[in-house]
Amino acid sequence: MDKAAAIKRIRKLRASINYHNKRYYQLDDPEISDVEYDRLMKELIELEGLFPQIDVSESPTQRVGAAPLAKFATVSHLTPMLSLANAFSEQDISDFEERTKRFLGADEKITFVVEPKLDGTAVNLIYENGAFTVGATRGDGTVGEGVTQNLKTIESIPLAMKKTKDSPPPERIEIRGEVYIETEPFRKLNKRRLKEGEQPFANPRNAAAGSLRQLDSRITAKRPLEIFCYGIGVVSGKTFKRHWDVLQTLRRWGFRVNPHVKQARDIQECIAYYHHIDKIREELPYEIDGVVIKVDDIEIQERLGSVSRSPRWAIACKFAATQATTRIKEIKVQVGRTGVLTPVAIMEPIKVGGVTVSRATLHNMDEIEKKDIREGDRVLIQRAGDVIPEVVKVILSDEHRGEKFKMPETCPDPGCGSKVVRIEGEKAYRCINIACPAQIKEHIAHFASRGGMDIEGLGDKLVAQLVDTELIRDPADIYFLNKENLLSLERMAEKSATNLLAAIEQSKTPPLEKFLYALGIRHVGEHMARVLARSFKTLDGLMAATEDDLLAIRDIGPEVASSITGFFGEQSNRKVIEKFSKAGVKPVEKSHPKDARLAGKSFVFTGTLGRLTRNEAKDIVESLGASATESVTKTTDYVVAGESPGSKIEKARASGVKIIDEKEFLKLTGRE
Ligand code: IVH
């Protein structure tokens, strides 16, 4: 291949890999198999090796896929990363201006730049001759942790600075910015963690910081991290006159700078900006905790210098958080599916940010000890976005305080009571009794849930009843229930029992990925279940896999691999799986649509179809990449109406959804 052809092919491969990275890591919806992906990557690596004169700095080969680190290197910042003094009111802001003027002596005119203050984690990025070489966390301001590999997985961090005519990349420059996670992706991330039996992050800031400090960069790659750059440290061979010029140049070099940054002529404009941003803050897709006011003129900045690790030329103006005070009536301990004990504060109901709350998460024992939270305490709580409220701190009064909180030594579930342990190196306390009723209930409810086997009518309450009456002890027992059993339950009517048994029967041939997710194996969430199903095709194939077989699959790290082999190696789990097979539960491999002409479309069926059964129609839809759902919503694309359709037709008309008959459906799907 000649160079021109190679360049063309490389360009194509890079675009294609970037696209598939996005589908895989960000959308959790890969379109090609791992094998196909690996083939593309291999070809690109080979071509780049054959033509070393072609620039690789922006190539996806440079972004993900490094082996996990044993620990982070320490990185000394070339210039210290300072923090900011705080202001909480207009008065504080005016005082800041007053102080600045006094320090400068003469009655100098000072102008400012104002910026939103993102609530994430600060990083320092070093670029040498335009190439990103080293990235670090803030650490103690002087020395941070080298998280270069992880930072490289963040798409909005350029691997190479853009070349511009008037500002060529300096020989060396430190770029400073805030890595953060947007509110909506944060919510999704936490939802997924809960489903996978992991502790949710307390807030987007913790999630961003935690994600950046992963030793395995493949984990970081899957977290929706973003960056806004707001300044520079050392820079060789270039001076800037104004901070504003720094921000504009950063933009031209290809760095993300917050679109709300603004120049302000005087402190009054800064105050107006502070109020304005506070007003629109709920509409921003990320959390901010205030605005930063910076003196624009860099020469003046230098004259002002810094004091106690904060510059005199800048200040953080914090917003009043959505906080409130209340009293903790009781600290309860909940047991999750994986046995983790989570302490929860039951509080006197209180309104924060327009919502009445009566529970707050206390996260874990470390958190309680650090804040010394006890029953009966008056506490300051805060709610960020839709996140579960948390206790910020105890407001001590003179009253006699309750005892220090202790994690129970035995499982709080009345039917369990076995010993609680804390595993070395883990924050969490766990009940490790596999027969713990609380865990069993959570486990079975997860098994039957929507994302799992989707057994309609088998919700939390009914599962609890079935476990309490000892009708079921593990998920496989569900398939041995009969009508007599069900009717013996309180409040169970004939019709519900019949429906439930039908739903159970219907769930016997689940797609393998649903079944694997339903099993509740640690670290196997919906996405991982899909990966496993695609790679192994059958349950037996997966059960026979060794850790090495698993590690050979992209996206499976050592933790996941050992969790899977551990799960299937466990005698009691194998017994349950045998029981499934005795009951006739047969996971099937879901065939992937070859013809995706209806990709992404959603269908709702109503009424009786003439030529097809409802299930056949659904299969057709799915084989073409579309989905069939039960209820009509604004996002429904087609309602297919058969004989004597139900109220779904009215709903479709009201929402303006397209209604078609069976004939049109057959045409649309190429069956006619
Ligand atoms: S300037 C010397 N600008 O706030 C100037 N910081 O308390 C130091 N932050 O560690 C930082 N948005 O993590 C600056 N627009 C912004 C910022 C910002 C968020 C964070 C940053 C820093 C902390 C300072």
Image (spheres, rainbow, N blue to C red):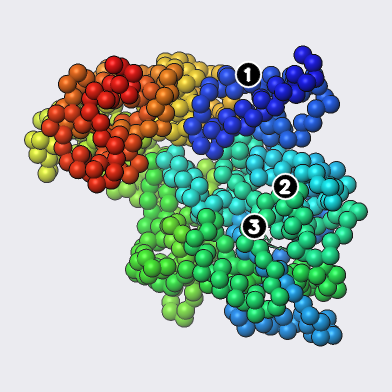
Q: Nearer the viewer, mark 1 or mark 3?
A: 3
Q: SS of the residue at dot 2? A: loop
Ligand 1 is within 8 Å of the C-beta of the residue at disc 3: yes
Residue located 35% across and 25% down the image: 622
In-image side of 417 versus 178 (left or right): left
Up-down relation of residue 288 to residue 429 (above or below)? below
Q: Which mark is residue 39?
A: 1
For disc 3, the marked residue is 258
Q: Amino acid at mark 1?
A: Arg
Residue located 36% across and 70% down the image: 350
Q: Amino acid at mark 3?
A: Asn
Ligand 1 is within 8 Å of the C-beta of the residue at disc 2: no
Counting from the top left corner in percent of width and height, residue 60 is at 68, 32
Would residue 577 be seen by someone viewing this image from the given angle? Answer: no
Instruction: State the CA–CA distance, disc 2 to disc 1.
Output: 30 Å
Would residue 538 be seen by someone viewing this image from the given angle? Answer: yes
Counting from the top left corner in percent of width and height, residue 65 is at 66, 30
Q: SS of the residue at dot 1? A: helix
Mark with earlier residue (1, 3): 1
In-image side of 406 versus 39 (left or right): left
Answer with the quadrant where ligand 1 appears in the image: bottom right
> Are the residues at dot 2 and dot 1 in contact (C-beta closer than 8 Å)?
no
